[in-house]
Amino acid sequence: MSAIKLRKPKIKPPRKLGADTAIEETWKLFSEAVREIFNHRASNLSYEENYRYAYNLVLYKNGHVLYDGLRGLITENLDKLAKKDIVPAFPATGNADPVQQSQEGERLLNALRDVWEDHSQGMSRIRDLVKYMDKNYTVTAKVLPIWDAGVQLFLQRIIRSPAYNICSHIINCILTQIHIERDGYTITRSSMKGCVDILLQIVDIDNGLSVYKTDLEPRVLQESKAFFEAECERLLEVCDAPEYLRRAEAHLASEAARTQNYLSYDTHAPLQRIVEDYLLRAQFHTIMAMPSSGIDNMIDTDKIEDLARLYRLFKIVPTEMPVLKKALKNSIAARGKTVNDASGEGEGGGEDEEEPQEVQGKGKGKERARPAKAGREQSAAVASKWVQDVLDLQDLFDRVLKLAFGNEVELQTAINEAFESFINLNPKAPEFISIFMDENLKKGLKGKSDEEVEVLLDKTIGVFRFITEKDVFERYYKTHLAKRLLNGRSISDDAERGMLAKLKVECGFQFTQKLEGMFHDMKLSAETMAAYKESVTRPSIDISVQVLTSTFWPMTHGVTPCTFSAEMNQAITSFERYYLSRHSGRRLTWQAAMGSADVRATFKARKHDLNVSTYALVVLLLFENVDEGGFLTYDEIKLATSIEDVELRRTLQSLACAKFKVLKKHPPSREVAQTDSFSFNNDFTAPLQRIKIGTVASRAENDDQRKETMERVDEERKHQTDACIVRVMKDRKRMTHNDLINEATAQLAKRFQPNPAQIKKRIEALIEREYLDRGEDKKSYIYLA
């Protein structure tokens, strides 16, 4: 059987159309193919054959027939799709159920999407068949390529259909879906996105804008304004401040998600601006001022999360940040006023280091003998409470700033300005801060470890940083430091020097120069006494002398009159001889008011070691030569001791009227008069071997004393201003008036807030003293070497 030979089939090309081929027949064949494409039967067609139909129509100068015919077929198909698929999907009117409305809207949006996909698929196939026409005819005829023409026809026959008003239904449907979602219901976002994408793709050639931009976006923004205007009023009625902020933040997030999921991203900015305008920008004042839930309440109740949300919303609207800054300032100012008012009734500062003694007995005398101690304790308590309240307030706002506001620099500056303002409204602030430091640097502080004291003093430096009159603080601090050092009451030398280092960092070397000199004097005094005791035969009285440089210490440097006993004079002379032999050209002035002494007194019951002031020792030694039962009058004591009346009365009151009555006063009373007489109390008894008899303290610094202190401060400021002006002019040689005022103000601001008028007066004084001279223009100054 012979094998069958297979031959390769021969493919014949389609028959070429000649010039005499009928145009009508060619178009008829091609139009039938186009209808088949629109009817989804393109698989039965020959691509090459139909391509040649279109090619020949263009080739033989009948491109207009092909182009116009295609437009007609596309229009016919779009009209059919509109009537068959879109119109039946129009939502029913009068349906109030949101779920039903959402489903009906979804059906219309899906219908539009399906029609667009059908149209796009058909146009894609047709575009492939008429590529030759798009390449040649549309260019010369200056018409749109067939795809673009199809898009415009879709816009005209579907979106803006003259017969069915489809555009209005589509826009209303999208707006309804958005409203339903804003009310908390769920919609099918994919349907929304598909429809919005169609509107974004369809661009009107007349204005170059998409249908989304011209028809949908303006309506979305308009409806959003109406919605959020009503929503704002509703939230203000039903929500407190934290809840309002939560709702506002949720709305911002939902609108951002809306533009991300189905609306155009270009709508994000104007839509967010609408939410900001209606829910935030116009309502920030109202929200923060809500009486029971505003910013003050959030701070008081430690609502860090709500405050952080408030800050985030302000960051979204940065132009409104001054509103938050002002609210914080007002809150701090109100709280600061409360703190200042609470301290207004007490008098601060200036207390004597010696602790006053309580007086036994009843009646008016007791009440009169205690006010010094009560005044001292009250002044220290008021000062400590004021500083502690300020520290607590600062801790509160530091916590808010860190945890809620992210340490925002602008807000930190506003908070610092508010603290500085209310702290300096209290004229006693420098004094109170010094007293607070003094209380925490003393020995015997109970209930606090060294670490806790260190942390507390660090915070106090933060408060000190706010005061403008740092020279006033320096004066009080020097007084308190001097008493701690001279009476051995410092908690530790390291703590004192640590505080000094902190003050130097804040104010510079000049501020602490005298304070460091005080420490240096104490060190040299200790070394001097050690050398004195080794090289000199001790006198009958064992003395410990502290040699103080007069310019460093804030005490009165004049001679305090006091006639010492022979034994005391012997010890004093011994030390003077030793000291002056090693330091020629110096002069020692003995300050009896600043010393203390330990003396052993013998009573009938037992002996006691008494710790008394130097004045009290001088008075007690007078009674060594008085017979038992004898007495000395006030005038006799004054004549023998030469102590001033004020100091003598205080000394006698502490010895005869306080808790430990080692002297008897005749007649008995709680006040010392010039007609009184005194005797040694041999019958004195006490359970303790060692007894401290402190001088009855003078009252805390009153208004007159504070006025005197400020006068001394003002006098010091004159010298500081003079020195500053001379220092500046010596460096610059010539300066205008305004430049000199500004430079002097800047340098002096580290110590106090100078008044330009006072600086001008000091300039005039320096001109009179020929340190400066006026320039020829009368507007500048010249330094005279």
Image: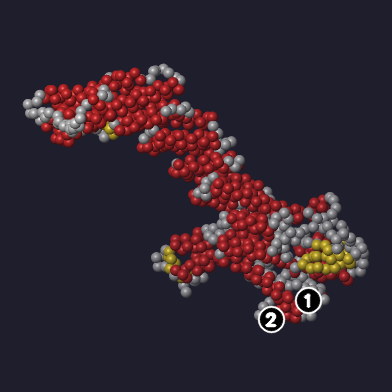
| Name of the residue lying farthest toward the front | 1
Identify the image quadrant of residue 661.
Answer: bottom right
Q: Residues within 10 Å of mark 1 (few under 14, many from 20)?
A: some
Residue under the point 89% across and 69% down: 626
Q: Is residue 626 left or right of residue 730?
A: right
Rendering quarter of residue 338: top right
Where residue 461 appears, x then y in whole percent?
A: 60, 57
Q: Which residue is mark 1?
A: 571
Spatial separation of the CA atoms under disc 2 and disc 1? 17 Å
Q: Is residue 188 shown left or right of residue 568?
A: left
Verify CB contact (< 8 Å) between mark 2 and mark 1: no
Query: What residue sits 34% from the left and 18% below the top?
Result: 88
Q: Is residue 98 above or below residue 615?
A: above
Residue sitting nearer the eye, 166 or 17: 17
Classify residue 726 as left or right of residue 38: right
For badge 2, the amino acid type reads Arg
Q: Quadrant of residue 212?
A: top left
Count of labels shown?
A: 2
The crowd level at tag 2 (other Cα within 10 Å; few <14, some 14-19, many 20+) is few
Q: Is residue 142 visible?
A: no
Q: Is residue 236 left or right of residue 268?
A: right
Q: Position of residue 118 (x, y in %)?
A: 29, 26
Residue under the image location 28 percent in, 27 percent down: 119
Identify the mark nearer the N-term, 2 or 1. Answer: 1
Considering the image in quadrants, where does the N terminus appear?
top left
Residue sitting nearer the eye, 759 or 160? 160
Percent position (x, y) of residue 300?
Answer: 60, 42
Q: Which residue is identified by label 2?
A: 582
Q: Secondary structure at mark 1?
A: helix
Q: Amino acid at mark 1?
A: Ala
